[in-house]
Image: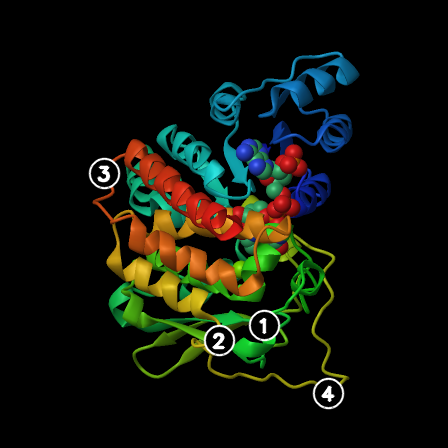
């Protein structure tokens, strides 16, 4: 029996994880946390019987506690407190954004295994997360489909035998468009992802290709390979999730219809593989797999992310926080689609990177980046 805590339980990944856990007798959900979604948390608490609950928003926590007739923790430190108090063996971090970093660090510092969907933890504070894993001895089990695939392609191949890793990208809803055609993209158009149904922030990141940039940094951190050995290829069908190129020329690929329950299940039941009701690839129907290089001119966010990764230190934290702010502004009609890239580039120019030596350093870089985006947005409105 594994005691599982789900952070971000009301989101796209969190709810699919609840479905996976409900089907696995070996997984006991002991803790649930989210931001402010009372109905979602209450429903998940009733469905699982989880004992430890948290909503970071205090008013929402009070309302959920009243509905359930039992305590619901709240406040900014609630996630970390839940991790340590719940006696969980495994923590799924499916919170969106750098808000998930502290809980990742707490989990790994406590020596617990971390099923990590929250890629922003590794982007903003990668070195800290890896150091916490080394110190505590817990595993980092990637939930991101490409990284789950890469982990499986790599198996126990020694790093010096790996030539490169290949991360696939669907290309998002605007694949093949020119920059001029992206100028007047609406929120609704950007939210219509061709192959994956996900939370709003990652869906916009997929449309700008920032998501792929964050994933390149995530892969660099998880698999300890230089940026020059991480390739991105656009693959519109999203059937090949990742590939490992070995030095003898072999290319090992991981395939399947896009379904996040597969990587979620792999991370939650690792090292066992349990049945998932995912649609199998059928050879009775013809289908083709297409691959093309990414367009780094049109989708400059991918280029900015790789550059920030190569710069290192707090540059990826600045990139990530600026992107979170810019995407939030885009989603509420406060800026245009192409401005997301411009705002991130502005923050990277405005906030000089420093060595990443503590959680506070990440927080400072994150806040400085958000302030740089906010001031640029208010100048634009003036
Ligand atoms: P959603 O927006 O659907 O869900 C986000 C979850 O995080 C919700 O439960 C939300 O709670 C919670 N949350 C948001 N802010 C906070 C906060 N400050 N403190 C605590 N909880 C918070 O996102 P997704 O499920 O799509 O994505 C989650 C993570 O997984 C992201 O890092 C994303 O990049 C990654 N990922 C997602 C994939 C997908 O298919 N969706 C694929 C690969 C990676 P509330 O509902 O109360 O606001
Ligand atoms: Mg992914």
Of pointers 2 and 1, the one earlier in the residue sequence = 1
Please tell me how crowded label 3 is: few (under 14), some (14-19), or many (20+) other residues with Cα within 10 Å. Answer: few
Residue assigned mark 2: 298
Instruction: Tell me the tag on residue 195.
Output: none
* C-alpha gap between disc 4 and disc 1: 33 Å
Q: Position of residue 254 (x, y in %)?
A: 53, 70
Q: Of tags 4 and 1, which is closer to the observer?
A: 1
User: Gap between marks 2 and 4, in whole Å?
Assistant: 32 Å
Depth check, mark 2 against mark 4: the one in front is: 2
User: In terms of image quadrants, where is residue 15?
Assistant: top right
Circles 4 and 1: CB atoms closer than 8 Å: no
Which x, y percent locates residue 17?
A: 65, 44
Task: Please tell me which of labels 2 and 4 falls first in the chain.
Answer: 4
Q: Is residue 272 visible?
A: no
Please report contact status of discs 1 and 3: CB closer than 8 Å, yes or no. no
Residue 286 circle label: 4
Crowding at dot 2, Cα within 10 Å, few <14 / some 14-19 / many 20+, comes out as: many
In the image, is residue 237 above or below residue 46? below
Q: Disc 1 designates what residue?
A: 182
Mark 1 secondary-structure assignment = helix
- Sooner in the amino-acid sequence: mark 1 or mark 3: 1
């Amino acid at each position: 029996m594994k005691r599982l805590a789900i952070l971000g339980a009301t989101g796209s990944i969190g709810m699919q994880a609840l479905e996976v856990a409900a089907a696995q007798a070996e997984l006991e959900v002991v803790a649930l946390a989210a931001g402010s979604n009372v109905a979602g948390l209450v429903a998940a608490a009733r469905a699982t019987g989880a004992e430890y609950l948290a909503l970071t928003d205090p008013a929402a926590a009070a309302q959920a506690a009243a509905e359930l007739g039992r305590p619901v923790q709240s406040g900014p430190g609630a996630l970390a407190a839940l991790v340590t108090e719940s006696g969980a063996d495994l923590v799924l971090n499916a919170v969106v954004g750098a808000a998930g970093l502290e809980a990742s660090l707490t989990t790994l510092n406590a020596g617990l295994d971390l099923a990590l969907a929250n890629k922003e933890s590794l982007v903003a504070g990668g070195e800290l997360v890896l150091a916490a894993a080394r110190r505590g001895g817990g595993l980092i089990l990637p939930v991101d489909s490409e990284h789950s695939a890469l982990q499986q392609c790599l198996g126990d191949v020694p790093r010096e035998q790996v030539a490169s890793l290949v991360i696939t990208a669907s290309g998002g809803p605007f694949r093949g468009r020119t920059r001029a055609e992206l100028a007047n993209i609406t929120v609704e158009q950007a939210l219509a992802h061709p192959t994956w149904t996900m939370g709003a922030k990652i869906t916009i990141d997929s449309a700008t290709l920032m998501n792929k940039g964050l994933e390149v940094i995530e892969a660099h951190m998880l698999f300890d390979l230089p940026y020059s050995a991480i390739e991105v290829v656009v693959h519109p069908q999203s059937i090949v999730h990742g590939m490992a190129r070995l030095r003898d020329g072999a290319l090992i690929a991981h395939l399947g219809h896009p379904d996040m329950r597969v990587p979620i299940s792999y991370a939650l039941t690792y090292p066992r593989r349990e049945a998932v009701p995912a649609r199998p690839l059928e050879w009775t129907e013809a289908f083709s797999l297409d691959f093309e290089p990414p367009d780094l001119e049109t989708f400059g966010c991918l280029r900015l992310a790789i550059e920030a990764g190569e710069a290192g230190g707090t540059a990826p934290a600045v990139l990530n926080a600026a992107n979170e702010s810019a995407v939030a502004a885009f989603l509420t009609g406060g800026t245009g689609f192409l401005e997301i890239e411009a705002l991130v580039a502005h923050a990277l120019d405005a906030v000089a990177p420093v060595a990443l030596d503590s959680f506070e350093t990440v927080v400072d870089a994150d806040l400085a980046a958000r302030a740089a985006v906010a001031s640029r947005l208010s100048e634009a409105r003036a």
